[in-house]
Image: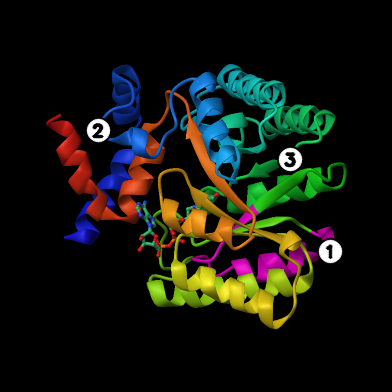
């Protein structure tokens, strides 16, 4: 049953018409548990609340399907506005973005120009930008672009997904760039040709990657709600006497709030990924696919 629901949510999330329809109706079906709002003002308000409880944030202006250069440029303009809003509000927050929303599938040059202008603005503010990792089809292009950017920018990081067989090698090969990496399990539906189908293998690989990155001395963002993996990272830090400043835990808005607050009390840096915008449907479906039990509260919200 879980597998069926997972596949259904993943397919719905990729459907352009479902995304379009959802955009028309506004944040519904309990999506506001995972999405901070539709406007920058609402997003900044959510960030202020997180900051007040000792948590940093990263804002993501949601945008799933970009059809042409004009839309890609609009999406880049929203990223710039988000950076401006963070600066004006003086909140403790950086930016996360997806390269497809900046035109990766349309024209690499357009995408490169867009991301450079965002990194320039962020650098002006002393801020940092994380490039999210999307599905396998975009993995190599994302890494290639990151490599190109890393030569000129210190304020950019990337994401490595533990479910991909290639990730260990990617991490090795990226090492010369002294990368700031966010480590995640991976959120997309991938073929067993490229990704571990079994959860246990993904978890084992996650441990391996966390170990590699933490022990390399480079900055690691350990992004998981899995308590066993959080414990693993903490133990590794303690065993090797690693400074807490070299890493942070990251979790998604609306998930594992208690765990986030406990880590703050223990003196760890915790950053919450806060998505916002009208294009919330695909993101919401990925969160449901991760945990089909969440479908229960969607049903409850349907009848509210
Ligand atoms: C800050 C951050 C950034 C991310 N960026 C990316 C990215 O760039 N690319 C990418 O592919 N993926 C990204 N992800 C998603 C990630 O790949 C996983 O899909 C997601 O984090 C769930 O995996 P988990 O590590 O929490 O472990 P799981 O084993 O999936 O979950 C562990 C426990 O966490 C809780 N939990 C997990 N997910 C949910 C949920 N949706 N609802 C309620 N409870 C839940 C449950 O208690 C579950 O038992 C990101 C995740 C985080 C936290």
Q: Residue placed at 79% from the left, 43% from the top? A: 155
In which quadrant of the rendered view does residue 281 lie? top left
Nearest to the observer: residue 7 or residue 256: 256
Q: Quadrant of residue 37?
A: top left
Q: Is mark 3 within 8 Å of ligand 1?
A: no
Is 281 left, or right, of 57 in this rendering? left
In this figure, which residue is indicated by the disc labeled 1? 176
Task: Provide the secondary structure element on which disc 1 rests.
Answer: helix
Residue drawn at x 60%, y 40% as measured from the top left: 58
Whether 191 is drawn above or below 135: the answer is: below
Please provide percent x and percent y for residue 212: 69, 74
Distance from disc 3 to disc 2, alpha carbons, whole Å, reads 33 Å
Q: Residue furthest right?
A: 152
The image shows residue 75, relative to residue 31, as above or below, that is above
User: What range is drawn magenta here?
Assistant: 159-178
Report crowding for label 2: few under 14, some 14 to 19, many 20 or more residues within 10 A (C-alpha): some
Disc 1 or disc 2, which is closer to the eye? 2
Farthest residue to the bottom: give it.
Answer: 239
Q: Label for residue 29? A: 2
For marks 3 and 2, the one nearer the N-term is 2
Among the two numbered marks 1 and 2 on one chain, the one whose residue lies closer to the N terminus: 2
Query: Alpha carbon of mark 3 to alpha carbon of mark 1: how far?
Result: 20 Å
* The quarter of the picture showing ligand 1: bottom left
- Seen in the image, is 170 located left or right of residue 24? right
**Magenta span contains residue 201:** no
Q: Mark 3 packing: few (<14 Cα in 10 Å), some, or many (20+)?
A: many
């Amino acid at each position: 049953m879980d597998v069926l629901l997972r596949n259904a949510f993943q397919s719905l999330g990729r459907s352009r018409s479902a995304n379009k329809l959802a955009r028309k109706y506004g944040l519904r079906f309990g999506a506001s548990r995972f999405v901070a709002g539709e406007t920058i003002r609402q997003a900044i308000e959510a960030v202020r609340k997180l900051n007040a409880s000792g948590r940093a944030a990263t804002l993501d202006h949601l945008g799933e399907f970009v059809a042409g250069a004009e839309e890609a440029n609009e999406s880049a303009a929203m990223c710039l506005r988000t950076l401006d809003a963070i600066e004006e509000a003086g909140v403790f927050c950086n930016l996360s973005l997806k390269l497809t929303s900046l035109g990766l599938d349309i024209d690499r040059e357009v995408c490169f120009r867009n991301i450079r202008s965002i990194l320039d603005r962020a650098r002006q503010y002393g801020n940092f930008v994380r490039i999210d990792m999307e599905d396998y089809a975009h993995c190599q292009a994302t890494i290639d672009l990151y490599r190109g950017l890393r030569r000129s920018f210190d304020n950019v990081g990337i994401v490595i997904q533990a479910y991909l067989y290639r990730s260990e090698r990617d991490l090795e090969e990226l090492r010369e760039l002294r990368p700031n990496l966010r480590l995640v399990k991976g959120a997309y539906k991938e073929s067993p040709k490229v990704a571990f189908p079994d959860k246990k293998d993904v978890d084992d690989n996650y441990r391996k990657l966390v170990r590699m990155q933490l022990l390399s001395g480079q900055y690691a963002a350990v992004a998981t709600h899995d308590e066993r993996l959080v414990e693993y990272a903490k133990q590794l830090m303690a065993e090797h006497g690693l400074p807490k400043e070299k890493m942070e835990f990251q979790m998604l808005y609306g998930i594992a709030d208690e765990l986030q607050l406990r880590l703050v009390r223990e003196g760890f840096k915790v950053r919450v990924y806060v998505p916002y915008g009208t294009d919330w449907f695909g993101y919401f479906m990925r969160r449901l696919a991760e945990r089909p039990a969440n479908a229960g509260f969607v049903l409850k919200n349907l009848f509210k």
